[in-house]
Image: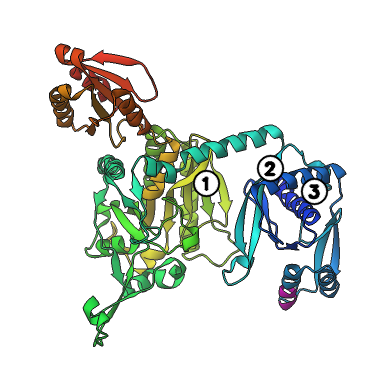
Amino acid sequence: MSKKEKQAEKMNIKRHSMAHILATAVLEMFPEAKLGIGPAIENGFYYDFDLPRTLIPEDLEILEEKMKKIIKENYKFEMKEMSIKDVLEHFQKVDQPLKVELIKDLAEKGEKMVSVYKSGPLVDLCKGPHLESTGEIDPSAFKLTKISGAYWKADENNQQLQRIYGVVFNNKKELKQYLFQQEEAKKRDHRKLGKELDLFTIDQNVGAGLPLWKPKGAAILNTLKRWFEDEQLKRNYVPVITPHIGKKTLWETSGHWGFYNDSMFPPMELGQTLEDWQDKRQTKESEIYLLKPMNCPFHVSIYKDDKHSYRELPLKYYEFGTVYRYEKKGELGGLTRVRGFTQDDAHIICTKEQLAEEMKQIIDFVQFVLGETFGFEMKIYASFRDKKSDKYLGEDAKWEVAEKTIREVLEKQNLDYTEEIGEAAFYGPKIDFKVKDAIGRYWQLSTIQFDFNLPERFQMTYTNDKGTEQQPFIIHRALLGSLERFMGVLIEHYAGAFPFWLAPVQVALLPVSEKFSDYTEKVNAVLRQESLRTEIHNQDEGLGKRIALASKQKIPYLFILGEKEVSDKTITIRQFGTKEQKTMSVEEFLEKIKKEK
């Protein structure tokens, strides 16, 4: 185990121990409290409780003080193995029905012995491990963060409990950095900024998880797509367009019908109109169709429509394809977790000999897009199979070629990466790129995925240089990933202040008064001829208020146009984020922004 892995494991143990300290404090405050479960999670911990009253935010401060005293007491974490019978009797005696239910579940699974941990007055059912004692925690390095509802065992048919969340770090400085990041994240929340900047909406009459792009949001997306399409064409990708639905037989052949059905929408039976269905008219014959969760089978179908020679390969199909995946309503969130989204989806169909060069080109493309263009720092993860597992499809020889290629290409380019054994998809190894945003959070965006499943299932072939049929390799490639998710990340990364080339409105023109409207219109026409996105802000409010409103919209440039500008045939500009004003000609401004486009 590496030093980094050991540190992560120790922190996980600390978080788990904090959950027990929280439970101890809650029982001190509410002796009649019923304990649910309390695991460690990313950055912290939570514990679920059945309490005699609803908690309020002020309760968290009281509980924090109690937890600090428990830490100061330096209680030992003592583990004891007990028989199911004895531990059941104990939790029945102390009136903990939720723990009793968990113990009975373990008994049904055939467990004979279970472990409990005692720390001070608390005895809890737990596998551990834990710290040696509560005193190992810095009392200034934790905080209870929020209260929420949670169904027992995550089942909405069960009773609702109250969940208390907390975070813990090694020291006060780390906690302070985290809390600052959280406050900054609230300000940058893409749902909040999306509404303030009028970028998108989610209408419940349309459906949860189905974003609607308003004109300003659509302007950003269309700019992004046009730029990315040009970049793909430069790299020999060819466009394809596919439908939103496909017949059941397609999904059976691809394997999605059986392997991906927990993320797909139910089928549509096509053989009648809506009117037929409403009038309950019987169908004589029908076909089953499904909304597509992925574009891959359609791209394969396009490939199979023609015979191919090795001379044509690699073939690089790309599409901005909208797909639909079922997510539970409670798990949806703004743009980052949706039910309908558009992928910058591409499939590279190539020979074994071409794999290394194609992988290199894709990695170079990722670095150009995420690194050079958007300025993200990246972490790279290579996911390989666990050779001891039998869950993987495809021949050993193909896995070995693909995994060897990934290692060699990454190492040849001197790229640091983390190997994750056992994290490969069942149909092939992959590379994931996680980007670090402006406030230090990591987001999963680009993926390069080998696929040994589709070429076999669809019996894809090409004619090799010896005149015989051979099966190609497929590499799935999404650089931006979901455009919706990418937009959510960008909004938060830029805090809504998009760079000039992407900004939905690049220039706002503000005439000092109505008598300068004609000049404003002339300047606007020149900008529009240069394909700039502009708005004229000539509302009834005074100039100061209009400047403030335009600044709230984070528009990169404001043009203030008054008597002096008209007489000198100039513009006075103010750039977003500054109060400094500069006067220049329109031609000078256009030269200036050529460097920013």
Q: Nearer the viewer, residue 487 or 408?
A: 487
Q: Earlier in the sequence, mark 2 or mark 3?
A: 3
Residue 149 at x, y percent in the picture = 60, 59
What is the secondary structure assignment of the residue under circle 1? Answer: strand
Q: Which mark is residue 381?
A: 1
**Quadrant assignment, res 108:** bottom right
Give the magenta-colored segment's residue range: 104-108
Q: Where 354 sits versus 571, above or below?
A: below
Question: Which secondary structure type mostly characterizes the magenta part of the structure?
Answer: helix
Answer above or below: position of 311 versus 553: below
Q: What residue did someone put label 3 on?
A: 131
Closer to viewer: mark 2 or mark 3: 2
Residue 249 in the image: state x and y as whole percent.
32, 75
Using a 10 Å C-alpha cutoff, classify the residue at mark 3 as few (fewer than 14 neighbours), some (14 to 19) or many (20 or more): many
Determine the CA span between mark 1 and mark 3.
30 Å
Q: Residue 219: image x %, image y %?
A: 27, 42
Report the Cα–Cα distance between label 2 and label 3.
18 Å
Quadrant of the image occupied by residue 591 = top left
Residue tagged 2: 143
Around disc 1, counting alpha carbons within 10 Å, would you say few (fewer than 14), some (14 to 19), or many (20 or more)? Answer: some
Specify whether residue 105 is painted magenta: yes
Q: Quadrant of the C terminus?
A: top left
Q: Could you say which is closer to the camera, residue 381 or residue 78?
A: 78
Rendering coords of residue 85 (x, y %): 84, 75
Q: What amino acid is found at the position of numbered circle 2 in the picture? A: Lys
Q: Secondary structure at mark 2?
A: strand
